[in-house]
Image (spheres, rainbow, N blue to C red):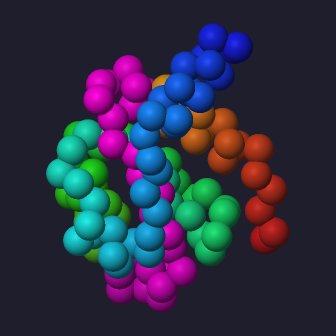
Amino acid sequence: DKEVRDAMSDIFSQHQIKRMPIKDAVKNAPESMGCYRILLGDKMSMDVKRAENLRESITQYYNQISSSNAGKFLIVEWLACSSSEQCRRIKTKWEREKETQKFPF
């Protein structure tokens, strides 16, 4: 576990996590491989995804929820990856973080 933590620390220190409302992310996310997570408000992680094309995947997610008011409150964080293994590690880390959250409802 320490080896994974060290590798993740290195990945996150070398890359900047981008963060913005989902309606803005559909225009600004890169068309590259990466991971993203959907946040409710400021920090409640609702969904974690790995994508071959971040912009396309975030746009598809947005189109699925755009008919509801939920899109007004959703924030997207993403990190472009240089390899599938890097994406797998990031997704695993974010999924573990999600599992430890306590939802207020």
Can residue 32 be seen by looking at this rendering? yes
Which of the 4 image quarters holds residue 57? bottom left
Determine whether, in the image, residue 76 is placed left or right of residue 55: right
Residue 71 sits above or below residue 91 on the image = below
For the point 29% across and 29% down, the residue is 82
Looking at the rendering, in which quadrant would you find the C terminus? bottom right
Across and down, in percent, residue 56 comes to 20, 57
- Viewer-proximal residue, 43 or 61? 43
Determine whether, in the image, residue 40 is placed left or right of residue 101: left
Across and down, in percent, residue 72 comes to 48, 85
- Magenta-colored stretch includes residue 11: no
Residue 7 sits above or below residue 40 on the image = above
Looking at the rendering, in which quadrant would you find the N terminus? top right
Residue 13 sits above or below residue 24 on the image = above
Across and down, in percent, residue 90 comes to 49, 34
- Magenta-colored stretch includes residue 84: yes
- Viewer-proximal residue, 16 or 33? 16
Which of the 4 image quarters holds residue 59? bottom left
Residue 64 sits above or below residue 15 on the image = below
For the point 59% across and 29% down, the residue is 9
Determine whether, in the image, residue 81 is placed left or right of residue 99: left
* Stretch in magenta: 64-88
Can residue 62 be seen by looking at this rendering? no
For the point 42% across and 52% down, the residue is 78
For the point 21% across and 44% down, the residue is 32
How many dots with numbers? 0
Name of the residue lying farthest toward the front: 14
Across and down, in percent, residue 63 comes to 28, 73
Determine whether, in the image, residue 65 is placed left or right of residue 10: left
